[in-house]
Image (cartoon, rainbow, N blue to C red):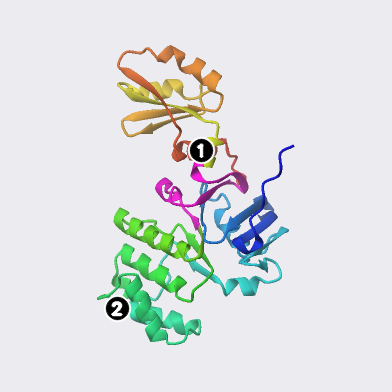
Amino acid sequence: MTAAPALAPAADIAIDVHGLSKSFGGREVVHDLSMQVKRGTIYGFLGPNGSGKTTTIRMLCGLLTPDSGEGTCLGYDIRRDADKIKRQVGYMTQRFSLYQDLSVRENLEFVARLYGVRDARGTARDMIKRLGLNGREEQLAGNLSGGWKQRLALGACTLPNPQLLLLDEPTAGVDPKARRDFWNEIHALAADGLTVLVSTHYMDEAERCHEIAYIAYGHLLAHGTVDEVIATSDLSTWTVSGDGLNALATELAGKPGIDMVAPFGTSLHVSGRDRAAMEAAIAPYRDREGVRWQHGEPSLEDVFIELMTRATDNFQ
């Protein structure tokens, strides 16, 4: 008999919840969700818009009371100790929420005083240095570019030294270099013990997370490391290149055994969970002139799209 896997020691667990459900207006937004997140982990949440990601994140950290279920966050009960949890949480929303008509320094000093941080000026000065905002201290926040606003917002929500950081699609509309710099800083914070929950639609950002969860319309469909999620998808994928791919995609879509046909640059990804049925479906097209078929490994985006096609929208 195989022994059950050992659970991580409680001290190493930031979030441990079981059976969480939440409804709004008679519609269930999150259904019977159970999850465990280790301290110092960057945990990514993926899923369609309206799938319950933000509601899940808010329940996990006591910001929203579930209709049913129980659990702990940072050692506190998510139902009884919500106020204690909130004091340990930094929250960075997609929309810039600091004062546009205050300078970088003034915003950070204001946040420091708001949280009762000793030596607000010195703390703000140290954060400016850490985030590379030197030389921009007196610039108005409203005049910053998207990338610099992002850094300032990150500095503001981590200035009180929270144990848990919530990021709600934090890099929407930010250029690639600014996104990379942002994620480098997030990894540095996690290495220091900060636990990070982040919702994102970017596959490259999901791949930067230590673990991910895919939530579709309130149901947790997959979770684990990126490699684990891909491996457990049971997808078989072919990459098709050559001529007439648009017409080929139309012909293949919907055939038994083919769960997904998606263009990727100058090629197609053709995937299915029933390997035998998919092989039978593509067999008539394998020898088509000017088309090359190459068997490959599914990408995280392949898995994401395939899961999305299978999910049922509970708001329709």
At x 50%, y 37%, the residue is 303
Count of numbered labels shown in the rendering: 2
At x 55%, y 35%, the residue is 233
Q: Name the residue carrying label 1.
A: 230
Residue 162 in the image: above or below residue 293? below
Q: In the rendered structure, which segment of residues is drawn in magenta?
A: 198-227
Q: Name the residue carrying label 2.
A: 137
Q: Residues within 10 Å of mark 2 (few under 14, many from 20)?
A: some
At x 44%, y 47%, the residue is 207
Q: Amino acid at mark 2?
A: Glu
**Percent coordinates x, y for residue 102 in the rendering:** 35, 80
**Percent coordinates x, y for residue 208 in the rendering:** 43, 51
Q: Amino acid at mark 1?
A: Ile
Question: In the visual, does 6 lie left or right of 277?
Answer: right
Mark 2 residue element: loop
Q: Nearer the viewer, residue 170 or 206?
A: 206
